[in-house]
Image (spheres, rainbow, N blue to C red):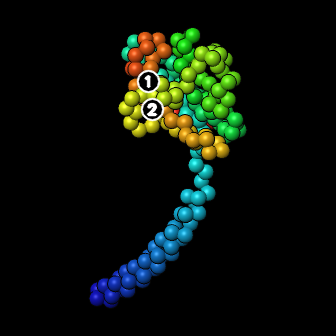
Amino acid sequence: MQANMQNARTCLRYFKRAFSGVMARLSKAALLTLPVILLAVPSPAQSGAIVSASCPCGYHRERMNLFGGLTNFRTVCRFPALCRKARAIALGNLLDPAAGAGDCPASDMVFYNDPALAPEHPGPALVTWNLPDGRGVAALFEGGYLCPACGRRTLTFRHDGFWD
């Protein structure tokens, strides 16, 4: 019986050493390969932002694709604008404001980044976009904007996701 116990202890010591050696090799391999895996996995490119606008008066506009995509970010930066004539939000190109929008001529548009339309107490930006060639940053805040329908500063924007 004592011989069996001795054999069991010897066998247990052998497995402990073998197991700890295997674990040490696995942990070293994980430490070496994890950074490679993390760097190799592509991260999703978040190009333009999708936002919606609403006002307590009942005005709303859903799913506006803002800014630019991977193929046109140097020439296009779609941004919400107040279309005075239509009393609605239009999407104009901040990089070519004279072009107007399909549903609003440039002469009737005022972009929501204009100081006259900016919220009084903006807080943190909801979405931002770095304009090319050092032209600054286009930022849209959550609320306090002039509503195109009722004319009060109760229009809010909501971030709905990203597009490309």
Left or right relative to 113: residue 1: left
Left or right relative to 133: residue 10: left
- Rendered position, 36 above or below 23: above
Q: Which residue position is annotated with label 2?
A: 141
Q: Pick the residue in front: 122 or 59.
A: 122
Residue 145 circle label: 1
Classify residue 131 by image quadrant.
top right
Q: Pick the residue in front: 91 or 40.
A: 91
Left or right relative to 21: residue 130: right
Q: Position of residue 115 (x, y in %)?
A: 48, 29
Give yes or no for contact between labels 1 and 2 (Cβ–Cβ under 8 Å): yes
Q: Residue at x 65, y 26 (%)?
A: 97
Q: Amino acid at mark 1?
A: Tyr
Marks 1/2: CA distance?
A: 9 Å
Q: Position of residue 68 (x, y in %)?
A: 63, 35
Q: Pick the residue in front: 126 or 148.
A: 148
The answer, for residue 46, to whether it is visible in the render is: no
Q: Position of residue 161 (x, y in %)?
A: 52, 33
Q: Residue at x 64, y 42 (%)?
A: 132
Q: Residue at x 55, y 63 (%)?
A: 35
How many residues crowd mark 1 within 10 Å: few (<14), some (14–19), many (20+)?
many
Q: What number of labels is visible?
A: 2
Q: Amino acid at mark 2?
A: Phe
Q: Quadrant of the N terminus?
A: bottom left
Q: Secondary structure at mark 1?
A: strand
